Image (tube, rainbow, N blue to C red):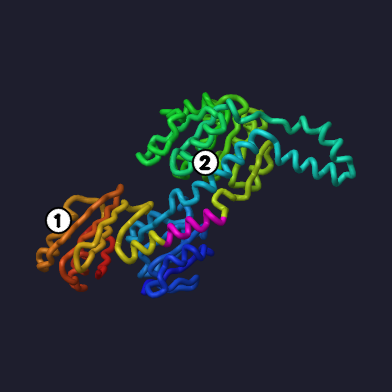
Amino acid sequence: MFRIKTLNKISPAGLSVLDKSRFTVSDDAENEDGILVRSADMQDYPFPENLRAIARAGAGTNNIPIARCSEAGIVVFNTPGANANAVKELTVCALLLASRDVVGGADWVKLQAGSGADVAAAVEKGKSQFVGPELMGKTLGVIGLGAIGVQVANIATKLGMTVYGYDPFLSVDAALSLSRFVHRAMDLETIYKNCDYITLHVPQTPETRGMINTDAINMMKGHVRILNLARGGLVNDDDMLAALETGRVAAYVTDFPNNKIVQGKRVVAIPHLGASSPESEENCAVMAAQELKDYLENGNIRNAVNLPSLVQDWSGETRLCIIHRNVPNMLASVTTVLSREHVNVENMTNKSRGEYAYTIVDVSARVGDAVANELRAIDGILRVRVLNH
């Protein structure tokens, strides 16, 4: 029986994936085998001895201590693409909010009504202060062509926009999904110099943090409109406020409000609604639970952020799941132990990702604790799990 702990409210559709005959799920589980989480901060979370995997029902994993998990042999999953449609739709909304001052106009109408004015007459006189441009014929730059960025780029072409997309790490699947009408930009400067609107769809990393700053804004067209529904730290708030004050940035729509940025002119601050739809929350929960289930039961890894994807069909009596450092002679050390103990290998797959690697070994007979402990004693091996078919 696997114990699963939930650190946030998880959609029932996701929890239903976990068969009650094999999984117990609660928010107070102890020495849990797996964790399902959304936005709860886990940076200082004490890892119990049994913890093998954390599944984040969402794309971002900034709330999870990835490096510490890797060193402990804990797989961290996310759910790329599960919330893509929800974020895409909100991005379309953000494009419109950046163009026309709908929020300001609606607030102004309420003020007129509250002051006792004839609203119908007042709007005809005052509406000109909220006028903004149409999207058709304008140029949009999409920075980051992952699951969300591709959908945003594609739908923007349907809105009559000229679209440039930039992503130095464009995957094959994303490239195949991208509309032929989207122009590939080979550098950010191309986006900055050509686009009337810029939308961010990249993860927050040390390299991307504060990427939208004074230097970047100075390369952009005047009166550019910027959207950030990815991560708040991608934009330097002080530099953005200065650019809004001068009008170099005509509008800024962010899904990550704070006390500082909401004070700026022409800032539309959305209360982190990007993935907040019933459909998105359900999709993320189902995907996260499926990833967790497949790993705990079969050792398969799909969509991990700290280890390579590796899926292998069962071909033996016992499966050894080995998380280790990506160093020379590791496979030779593993097979040496198995050979010495007269364990026959039916199938073995190894993949690496950066400093870490993952190996699945299917063997023809049951493997006891003695063999598993010999493997654990090999320098560079972080975790060994033994699964029986």
The span picked out in magenta is 278-289
Q: Within the image, what quadrant is residue 169 found in? A: top left
Question: Residue 299, image x and y in percent?
Answer: 30, 62
Crowding near the residue tagged with mark 2, few <14, some 14–19, many ≥20 C-alpha atoms within 10 Å: many
> Which residue is more in the foreground, 95 or 328?
95
Find residue 201 and report its horizontal and vertical position in percent. Answer: 49, 41
| Residue pictured at 68% horizontal, 36% vertical | 266
Quadrant location of the N terminus in the rendered image: bottom left
> Which residue is most to the front?
158
Q: Main secondary structure of the magenta part?
A: helix
- Residue labelled with disc 1: 332
Please say if 80 is above or below 160.
Answer: below
Instruction: Confirm whether the magenta stretch covers residue 284.
Output: yes
Pointer 1 or 2: first along the chain: 2
Look at mark 2 in the image and give the residue it sits on. Answer: 234
- To which quarter of the image does residue 146 belong? top left
Would you identify the image quadrant in which residue 132 lies? Answer: top right
Which amino acid type corresponds to the residue marked 2 in the rendered image? Leu
Q: Residue at x 22, y 54 (%)?
A: 349
- Secondary-structure class at tag 2: helix
Q: Is residue 369 above or below residue 139?
A: below
Residue visible at 30% across and 47% down in the picture: 354
Does any portion of residue 241 appear in the rendered image? no
